Amino acid sequence: MSTRAAALLRKPGQPQRPSLLELFFDLVFVFALNRVSQQIVEELTERRIVLVDAAQMLLLLLAFMVLWFVTAWVTDLYDPQRPQLQVLVYTAMLGAMMMAVAVPEAFADRGLAFAGACVAVHIIRGLVIVPILRGHEAQRRAAGVFFWFTLSAVPWIAGAIMTDTVRGVLWTLAIAIDGTALLLFYPAPWSRPTPRQWPVLAEYLSERYQQFFIIALGELILTTGSAYSDTSFRGGGAAAAFAVAFITTVLLFRVYIFRAGQLLPEAIRAAKEPAHLIREAFLAHVLMVVGIVVVAVGYEIVIEHPFGENHAAWILVVLGGPMLFLIGRALVEHAVFSRVSRSRIIGALALAAASPFMIPLPPLAVAVTAVAVLAGIAASDAVHARGKPPEGPHPRNPRQ
């Protein structure tokens, strides 16, 4: 076995909690998520966002999320105390910052800056890790990851030099490649992924997922706080909207951590094939984080126009954000308990059913509707938990 490879891999007995390095890395993503949400707000309030605009912002958001999740897996598999890994984390930070700065013009004049930074982070990671692992079986896994990011680099860069429509198509292909490869654990012609190739530190990776959720909540606080601070006339409507936004943030946190959110590490440890549970948790957190970014967009609009004329797109973000969150939260529950609480399903359906009736109402009333649904779910959780012993995780065995 290569000495350099052995030094790079995590060792048994090393701390299984994220270090300050990972938390430092996370700071960039508060800024990145905020740039995406601010761009959506601008589109919504100035041009009445259309489906194409929404799809473009979703592509950018997914690019950030792939970068974050892959970096989290890298620091899970390898020793973050090694200088090479630390340099890779700093490189990912710089790349994410460059991507975030380019967000407003990513589908205009700064497409190459966004795509180039995204591709550079993934390619540099592979060029560093794959040679170091020479002579170790882990090199096959790292080479598979590098192969897929090399493949997706082609539509990323090609799209960056094309016009808006073609750029959107090519970048959609690039995200599809990145996301599919990630969900399949990067199969390659020379290597089929196995549980042994992807060892999981349950405590570490589940805590990283939880921390990314907290990043999204931090972006929500930043967005709503800034919106209220910048409101030229802070009348009763803006104050009420700000209060509703804060209550929503608390409710999202409470609903997230209830039982399943807290038991995710235990569920990963109890699973016969932890990699499958990790994949389901990944999808769940993608949906929840996207939902919270949409919530941030909606509540900034509500704070700025609490009693203004309503629009269908505004209703979509104010109610759609909590819906996406609840769908993602249901996936977490399914991963941990192999079931989903009725309250999550009923809540999502209630938000969808309420949407058509919101047009005559001011934006603040729409936000209050979302809060009422989330509060009902939180209350249902509390009632069902009262007087009952804590439930243990029951992850599904994929082979059953």
Image: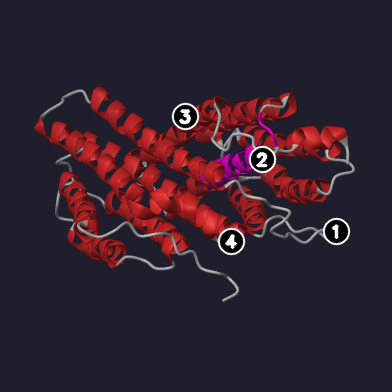
Q: Nearer the viewer, mark 1 or mark 3?
A: 1
Q: Earlier in the sequence, mark 1 or mark 4?
A: 1
Dot 2 corresponds to which residue?
A: 74
Callout 2, which amino acid?
Val
- Indicate left or right for 87 with 353 as reference: right
Going 57% across and 57% down the picture, which residue do you hit? 279
322 or 48: which is nearer to us?
322
Q: Say which mark, if any, is on residue 276.
A: 4
Q: Is disc 1 in contact with disc 4, using a CB cutoff of under 8 Å?
A: no
In this view, the mark in front (2 or 3): 2
Mark 1–mark 3 distance (CA, rounded to whole Å)? 39 Å
Spatial distance from mark 2 to mark 1, Cα to Cα?
A: 21 Å
Considering only order in the chain, which callout, 3 or 2, is on the residue closer to the N terminus?
3
Q: Secondary structure at mark 3?
A: helix
Magenta stretch holds residue 332: no
Residue 165: where, in percent of width, then height? 59, 51
Label 4 element class: helix
User: Taking the image as drawn, is residue 147 in sight?
Assistant: yes
Secondary element at tag 1: loop
Which amino acid, by three-letter code, is at mark 4? His
Where is mark 3, residue-wise?
31
